[in-house]
């Protein structure tokens, strides 16, 4: 389940980041409540992408997921960068980039949680209904039970 989704300013780079509710307050809140946790998570995601943008190959857009390791109390960001967006009904290539704290790690994927798989599926289905990258970026897919919770739901940075 996700607490929020947000876009980077001016869509640079184009993409959206989802903030996972699981462990949000525990890892990002530092004892100061969910509002502080969400703000810290957004700052973490934005800064991590900005600080590491020279480590990515060229991509059309990304889907990011900010999550927490509640055992080690670590901040994580997983970016799925998509290539060949303009092959609208094709099968675009997707690369995965995993950050722990603000550092890019090269680690083998051993599993993806069900929420991530569902999110990527719904984003892909939605992408196929849009006219362009700009159209895609200005609207969101409906995620059903994974939809960001109201109160802090949609955040546009």
Image (cartoon, grey):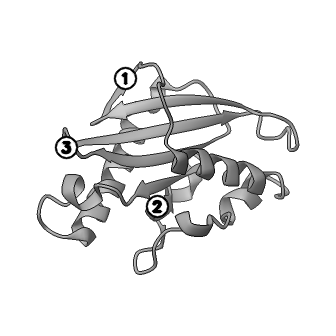
Q: CA distance from mark 1 to mark 3?
A: 17 Å
Query: With respect to residue 84, does 136 lie above or below?
Result: below
Q: Which residue lies at the image location 37% right of the left edge and 60% below the top edge? A: 21
Secondary-structure class at tag 3: loop
Residue named by callout 1 = 105
Q: Percent from the top left, x then y, of residue 18?
A: 48, 55
Whichever of callouts 2 and 1 sits on the residue coming sooner in the sequence is: 2
Q: Nearer the viewer, residue 55 or 23?
A: 23
Q: Which residue lies at the image location 45% right of the left edge and 65% below the top edge? A: 4
Secondary-structure class at tag 2: loop
Q: CA distance from mark 3 to mark 2?
A: 19 Å
Q: Nearer the viewer, residue 82 or 121?
A: 121
Query: With respect to residue 58, does 87 lie above or below?
Result: below
Q: Percent from the top left, x then y, of residue 30?
A: 13, 58
Q: Residues within 10 Å of mark 3 (few under 14, many from 20)?
A: few
Residue named by callout 3 = 73
Residue named by callout 2 = 1
- Would you identify the image quadrant in which residue 52 lies? top left
Q: Which residue lies at the image location 67% right of the left edge and 58% below the top edge? A: 137
Viewer-nearest of labels 1 and 3?
3
Q: CA distance from mark 2 to mark 1?
A: 24 Å
Q: Is residue 45 left or right of residue 156?
A: left
């Amino acid at each position: 389940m996700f607490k929020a989704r947000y876009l980077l300013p001016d869509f640079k780079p184009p993409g959206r980041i989802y903030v996972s509710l699981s462990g949000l307050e525990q890892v990002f809140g530092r004892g100061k409540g969910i509002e502080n946790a969400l703000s810290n998570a957004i700052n973490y995601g934005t800064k991590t992408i900005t600080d590491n943008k020279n480590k990515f190959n060229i991509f059309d857009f990304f889907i990011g997921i900010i999550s927490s390791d509640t055992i080690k109390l670590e901040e994580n960001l997983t970016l799925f960068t998509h290539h060949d967006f303009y092959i609208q009904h094709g099968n675009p290539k997707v690369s995965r980039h995993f950050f722990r704290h603000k550092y890019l790690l090269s680690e083998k994927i051993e599993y993806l949680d069900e929420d991530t798989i569902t999110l990527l599926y719904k984003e892909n289905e939605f992408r196929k209904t849009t006219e362009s990258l700009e159209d895609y970026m200005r609207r969101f897919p409906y995620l059903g039970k994974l939809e960001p919770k109201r109160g802090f739901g949609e955040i546009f940075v």
